[in-house]
Amino acid sequence: MLKILCLLVIFIVHSAHAQMSDQLANRVFGAVSTEKFSFHETTYFIFGKDDLKLQYSFKYRLSKSYNLYLAYTQLMFWSVYDESKPFKDVNYRPELFYRLLDTETKFIKSIDAGYWHLSNGQKEAESRSLDEIFIRATFLTKLNRNTIGSVLKIHTIYNEDKTNKDIVDHLGYWHLNAFITDIVTMWDNRVDFTMRTYAGSKVYDFDQGGIELGATYNFIDSDFNPALYLQWFEGYAENLLEYNKKHTEIRLGFLLSF
């Protein structure tokens, strides 16, 4: 697993499209703090063999003078192939954070301190919820005209629902999100790679955590705005309902930008 992470960091191909790389950074990390309403995490819809996975995420700056943000992310697993098409699990995540550091030019793009609540809104045996306090640092740089970015979040989980008291065994104490742009270029378009990973409660226990790898095909010279998005996930806690069940999923769909 560690070899995969290292390869993702060092595998960089020479390419152009620097302006589009900046747009990807905004797509993954959100726009600069001077904007009231902006991206927070990725927004996409992707089809797998069993379901449609959807996520949308945004943040809103509450003050002109202070970097205080209200954010919301919703992750849904929709059983579109079933006759009644029920939502298998919906994860709601309101978030409040303060941006301690915010810069557009330095290697460290931002540092946040905040709180979020994560719940699936169910009752009794299917109820899952937790609270989290975190410190989150965003890094961004360019090498050989490629953009490399990452978000490292250190957190502590508390107030777990009685149905998921052991969820920290899979979500652990840290979370890493990263991307590299312009890995491949073809037909005046480009492919970027993304990664999301977390370990279990032993800090480095990847077998109890999860890893998500993604590839986006960006239509640069086209009127079509979404990017084609391929995602592979393996591990635990992709959703709250089945957080303690390990599985592997491959999904394909579109990643949206505005």
Image (cartoon, grey):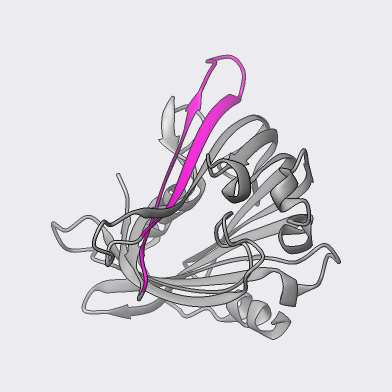
Instruction: Out of 80 and 232, give the one closest to the viewer.
Output: 80
Region rendered in magenta:
50-78
Image coords of residue 81 (percent x, y)? 27, 67
Image coords of residue 232 (percent x, y)? 47, 75
User: Is residue 101 on the magenta stretch?
Assistant: no
Judge left or right: residue 188 versus residue 211. left
- Which quadrant: the C terminus? top left
Query: Is residue 256 placed above or below 117 in the rendered structure?
Result: below
User: Is residue 61 on the magenta stretch?
Assistant: yes
Q: Residue at x 74, y 43 (%)?
A: 160
Q: Residue furthest front?
A: 124
Query: Is residue 72 placed above or below 240 in the rendered structure?
Result: above
Q: Residue at x 86, y 66 (%)?
A: 202
Query: Is residue 198 placed above or below 246 in the rendered structure?
Result: above
Q: Residue at x 41, y 55 (%)?
A: 24
Among the 4 quarters of the image, the one containing residue 186:
bottom left
